[in-house]
Amino acid sequence: MQLDNRKKEVLHAIVDDYVSTNEPVGSKSLIERHSFNVSSATLRNDMAELEHLGLIEKPHTSAGRIPSDKGYREYVNSLMTIEELTPREQLEIEKRINTSVDEVTELIKNATHTLSETTGFVSLAMSPRLKKSFLKQLKILMIEPGKALVVMVLSAGVVKDKVVRIPNFLNDEQIMKISGAIEKSLTGKPLDEITLVTVETAGKSTDVPEPLLKQVLYEAYAAIKQADELNIYLEGEHRMLSLPDFSSLGRARDLLGTLSDSGMVAGYVNEMENVARELGSDDSYMIRIGQEITLEGLDDCSFITATYNLTDSVSGNIGVIGPKRMLYSKVISQIDFVKKKLNEEMKKFT
Amino acid sequence: MQLDNRKKEVLHAIVDDYVSTNEPVGSKSLIERHSFNVSSATLRNDMAELEHLGLIEKPHTSAGRIPSDKGYREYVNSLMTIEELTPREQLEIEKRINTSVDEVTELIKNATHTLSETTGFVSLAMSPRLKKSFLKQLKILMIEPGKALVVMVLSAGVVKDKVVRIPNFLNDEQIMKISGAIEKSLTGKPLDEITLVTVETAGKSTDVPEPLLKQVLYEAYAAIKQADELNIYLEGEHRMLSLPDFSSLGRARDLLGTLSDSGMVAGYVNEMENVARELGSDDSYMIRIGQEITLEGLDDCSFITATYNLTDSVSGNIGVIGPKRMLYSKVISQIDFVKKKLNEEMKKFT
DNA sequence: GTTGGCACTCGGGAGGATAGAGTGCTAATC
DNA sequence: GATTAGCACTCTATCCTCCCGAGTGCCAAC
């Protein structure tokens, strides 16, 4: 995009003004609000040019201009400067996240909540991707005949468990044997290297009769697989209703309808993450603007996520879904700060 | 309320018509849609009377009438007849709930989801009130130095756990001793009879040094207390946006804003339950209509809940929040049926 | 107690005029 | 060649006004 300096400033100003007023911005009001040393006619020429390049557009002939998705993209990529949060804002966020909790999950929920409150938008977080974390402990506890609890402690400081059904005849001692055998041979293995075969091999060393053994092993395997399933935490959906961008009930309905399918949103975030990795992107955050988002009803939204790290190899995403007409520089720095604090707090768990 | 038969029929007809058309209903259209053997003028007299009694009201002078909260209340208490679901509808619900799950929590979530889908409204469920269930097992597992997992199995077939911090110096053996001591003396005790003192007394029989012991006991106690905390599951908030009753963005915003504070909703449901118990109500469901609901923004809603039973002494609530302009007879039977199926499925867990 | 008749009320939709912000284009100027 | 003033044009949003129609309350008659 070869834009001369003034055109860049014009685009910058249009985005700024539109974000703060929610009104299409015209050449004249642009002159009034900013100190361009040229006339409105000159800006009109520039604006015609910017429109030709697809960076801004007119809602209708006699209105001002609003940024297009491409315009926002240009703004985000090359024009904006990210501002630090004020100490006051930082303090506010720190205070909210710092409430001591005993589990990583709680911490992540905390951070998500904080992010929604500080940005005023929908916030979301993915649970950590645990595939690369390894098993530190695995215990099978007998709950009652036919039922047991598989408890796993993972390297990332995460505890997972799952109630499973087991054959009725198995006694406490047999379960302990199986539990011990699995633990002994799987400890230290990353979750994504554990297969049904690995688990079955591990169980072979016990003297528990075959068919009974097999079912327990299978259930243990299923519990391990379930441990690295992804969860998503979404919060603040109702805040979207307060934004003028969603004052049309139809849009609001589509948006909240889509967000209510958390599995779909989770899938999308995951896909974003994968794409970013493939591209070897080294940005600390990912942004999707308007139509770049392939989820239905999010055409007027932007999606910004950052990656938090629980350990070197275990990470997840945290971010925001807001209107594409948002103060990107501010929101990005808010996400960034929350992520930073989240990372710091996470160190306490690993 | 001393209403002659025709007035009852008129009120019944007004509620029915208004629920199905969402238009204020006038004397003339009442004649057209129903077979009253009187003229519209007569109905006008009846309607004036009903209005005088506060059962119906006019949005403005020249409109038809709509039921007031009191009118709906009369309808629900004395006029409506609850209709059975069709076999087809029953099947639909059964199919959705019957998906086999391993934990009660999952089952409840399932039921909530089903209820939202079948009614088209917001559904909610409270987790079972576990105060009256007793401890069947309690194990403390060492996770790593300074950290342990308290696992509790309750009589109602529910498994709860909590990660707790413990003194760094404690070793595996000491923890097991404490764990065993607590389990031995608390097994069989209802949760609400377990106090910090009970737990501390239980721990005395071990030879673990006092200050270390004390912290573990305290954490175990906290874990037990946390086990009977109430959770609420809310689902389908976005569905409210599709209802004409909430086509005003302001109302929709207030409603979803309130519902987003799940703690508050949970508190309210709990209060409803307590009031019903005090009154010794033997209804199988509770209904709050319009202004009877003290939550902000729910003036145009009705709140219907039923009580499910996990065991004789352990129960929770499941129900719906919908517009007060709803088909009560239908919704109530839907809730009732879901509750029934939920109870049946729950038997498998206890 | 019921009914037909009638004057009255009020919201909502249709049509029309107007203001105002903004545009593109042209011709003159720097 | 870039910039500017000026101007005719465009389109939306808003405000009036008017009027239809559904509904009401009340009265006098049955």
Image (cartoon, coloured by chain):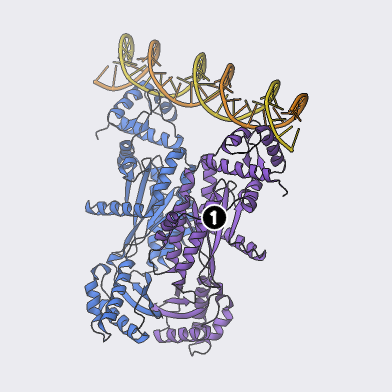
Chain colours: A blue, B purple, C yellow, D orange
B201 above or below A100? below
Q: For this view, does A123 lie left or right of residue D19?
A: left
Which amino acid, by three-letter code, is at mark 1?
Ile
Find residue B210 and report its horizontal and vertical position in percent: 52, 86
**Mark 1 residue element:** helix
Few, some or many residues within 10 Å of mark 1 (<14, 14–19, 20+): many
Camera-side residue: A220 or A242?
A: A220
Residue drawn at 26 percent across, 87 percent down: A207
Q: For this view, does A319 lie left or right of residue B286?
A: left
Q: Is residue B179 visible?
A: yes
A108 above or below B17? below
Residue drawn at 30 percent across, 37 percent down: A70
| Among the 4 quarters of the image, the one containing residue B28 | top right
Number of callouts in the render?
1
Residue drawn at 31 percent across, 62 percent down: A129
Camera-side residue: B28 or B172?
A: B28
Q: Please give the chain letter of the residue carrying mark 1.
A: B
Quadrant assignment for the C terminus of chain A: bottom left
Find residue A228 and report its horizontal and vertical position in percent: 32, 65
Q: For this view, does A266 lie left or right of residue A91?
A: left
Quadrant assignment for the N terminus of chain A: top left
Q: Which residue is mark 1?
A: B332
